[in-house]
Image: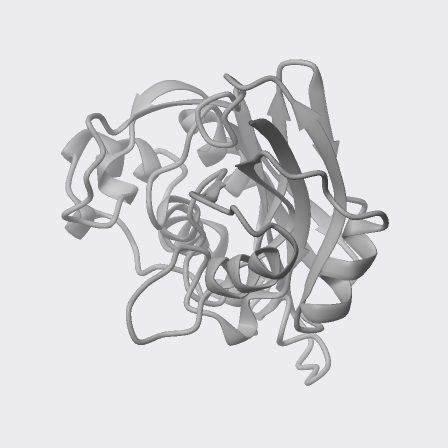
Amino acid sequence: MARYFLQLAYDGSNYCGWQVQPGVNTVQEEVEKALAIFVKDLGRVVGCGRTDTGVHASAYFLHFDTAMDLPENFCFKMNAVLPMDIAINGIMPVNGDFHARFSAYSRSYDYFIHFSKNPFRNAYSVYHPRKLDLERMNAAAEFLIGERDFTSFSKGQTQTKTNICNVSAAEWKHIDDGVVFSITANRFLRNMVRAIVGTMLPIGEGSEEPNHILAVMEKKSRMAAGKSAHPQGLFLKEIRYPEIHVASNR
């Protein structure tokens, strides 16, 4: 059996996240249906992680095993049968112990916000009518750096063994008529980035102080954090593996 890593990107607007779930449309289901056309002995397909309903991925990995010789122009043929909102960007053979989820040592997300009402940006950015003070928000972001307990920013009733994550970078930046929050960590909990953004917005608006984020983390309760920010502004943008580094150009 040979193991392959498949790199893809997807617009999550029409999907209930990556992972297969009964009764709803997911990205994994669409990809597995396409793979089954060309990989007749397709078994388990393993993704690099979950994304929530409506969240996008500009760089995503999965792996699968097969004893077959893959057809020529495999990526072209996959793209021909996949929906327009899912794109295969590359495939590579890897060692059999390489794992799409567990071999990754960091993941990065971007969250986009725009300030002028614009119907053409709403699918990939979130409209926020009030300006935000990025100096205050970046002061708050510094409290996220390092190995921390992120229970307050995690959706409840998850099957994770620990809520400890190691955040290596977290920063807000100005972009054209908006801002972007970029965060990198070794792992992320369900809903974590959106909960962090939702907690930071009152800090940027001036109704909370930057150290509010630290107080929220210390309570280790989702009730202490703010509402989850809307999903459409969130992109999984980068995944790093030993010997593999894939990033999007969005």
Instruction: Say which quadrant the N terminus sits in.
Output: top right
Outermost residue, bottom side = 119
Instruction: Identify whether 103 is placed above or below 79.
Output: above
Image position, residue 198 (x, y; %): 39, 55
Front position in the image: 21 or 167 = 21
Query: Residue sitting at 48 percent across and 57 percent down?
Result: 28
Q: Place residue 238 in its image quadrant.
A: top right
Front position in the image: 51 or 48 = 48
Query: Residue sitting at 40 percent across and 35 percent down?
Result: 188
Task: Look at the image and tell me whether residue 229 can be seen.
Answer: yes
Task: Look at the image and tell me whether residue 169 can be seen.
Answer: no
Image position, residue 232 (x, y; %): 54, 66
Number of callouts: 0
Query: Residue sitting at 42 percent across and 61 percent down?
Result: 229
Instruction: Identify whether 108 is placed above or below 97.
Output: below
Colour convention: one colour
Image position, residue 90 (x, y; %): 77, 42
Query: Residue sitting at 73 percent across and 39 percent down?
Result: 91
**In the displayed structure, does residue 9 sit left or right of residue 33?**
right
Image position, residue 165 (x, y; %): 36, 24
